[in-house]
Amino acid sequence: MKVQINGFTMAYTDAGAGLPIVFVHGFPLNRRMWEPQVSGLANGVRTLAPDLRGHGDSPPLPGPYEMDMLASDLNDFLDALEIDEKVVLCGLSMGGYVVFAFYRQYAHRVRSLILTATRAAADTAQGKSARDAMVQRVQSAGIEPIVDEMAPKLLAPGNAAHRPELVNQAKEIMLGTTPEGMIGALKGMKSRPDSTPTLSKIETPTLVVHGAEDQIIPLQEARGMAEAITGARLEIISNAGHLLNLEQPERFNLVVSEFLESV
Ligand code: MLT
């Protein structure tokens, strides 16, 4: 499906009926990463999964894609779909950075948060240099070498070694990103603010969920966020890395369903 927002046509998936849950994908992924949630959670919930600008079937507009801009896109998206009731917002990794930005600006639209494989801190100086290096690499060599390198790191080491179909699925999804989209997101993530001060201000029920073997964002980050958010629930999924929702879809969906029932 497609909808006109903020000067561009945003692609999205809209399935089921009931409590709206907005799934925000990570980098350099797109809404296809949420397929097991769209098909597995449909009972009693409306799953909405947009492609952020520059990703999947949404157009590669010029960057940088600041997290506030991506949050404003989501706000427009909800307006365009005339969703007035409060939504559950689930963001994975970069999607989590967008969730923090959204919460700072539009907390009144949020019923509860699901912070998936993400972190509150901004990039370190070293992290910012790595973003610059990746931008240069995309400019000189395109996205394929980066996708090949990144795919196994997105999974738990055991899954990367023994589940080639998952590695290929991650690659295929990432290949849906254009060089412009990748660069826009890298620059936006590089300049994102520290969301640590936001944590103590979160007043909505929050689930922090993380893969025990995340090679991109250490589990420690999830523990720190869960401690800093009043009443947050922490769930750690074993045999899963950064793409825990794809690596352990049934367990992930169960954790999400139990959280939704509890709030
Ligand atoms: C993601 O999965 O969205 C990215 O790895 C996040 C990041 O690069 O900081």
Image (cartoon, rainbow, N blue to C red):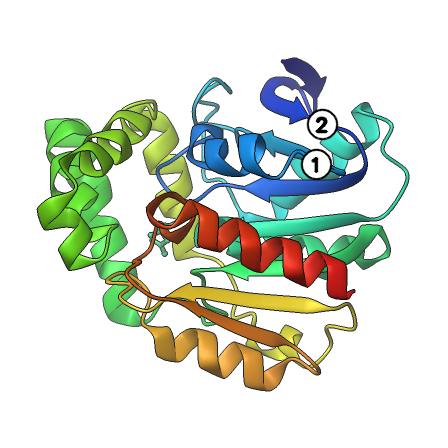
- Between residue 200 and residue 63, name the one nearer to us: 200
Q: Label 2 CB, ligand 1: below 8 Å? A: no
Q: Quadrant of the C terminus?
A: bottom right
User: In the shown orientation, is residue 263 left or right of residue 237?
Assistant: right
For image coordinates 24% across by 41% down, the residue present is: 135
Mark 1 lies on a secondary structure that is loop
Between disc 1 and disc 2, the foreground one is 1
Q: To which quarter of the image does residue 138 belong?
A: top left
- Residue that mark 2 sits on: 16
User: In the shown orientation, is residue 66 left or right of residue 87?
Assistant: left
Image coords of residue 115 (percent x, y): 55, 61
Q: Is residue 148 above or below residue 223?
A: above
Which amino acid type is marked by label 2? Answer: Gly
Which amino acid type is marked by label 1? Answer: Asn
For image coordinates 59% across by 41% down, the residue present is: 23
- Residue that mark 1 sits on: 43
Work out whether mark 1 precedes mark 2 in sequence or the reverse, and give the earlier one: 2
- Between residue 134 and residue 86, name the one nearer to us: 86
Evaluate if marks 1 and 2 touch, with contact meaning CB atoms under 8 Å apart: yes
Between the C-alphas of marks 1 and 2, the distance is: 7 Å
Q: Which residue sits furthest right? A: 84
Image coords of residue 215 (percent x, y): 23, 62
Image coords of residue 235 (percent x, y): 50, 70
User: In the shown orientation, is residue 225 left or right of residue 214?
Assistant: right
For image coordinates 40% across by 36% down, the residue present is: 184
Q: Is residue 43 above or below residue 14?
A: below
Q: Which mark is residue 20?
A: none
Q: To which quarter of the image does residue 199 belong?
A: bottom right
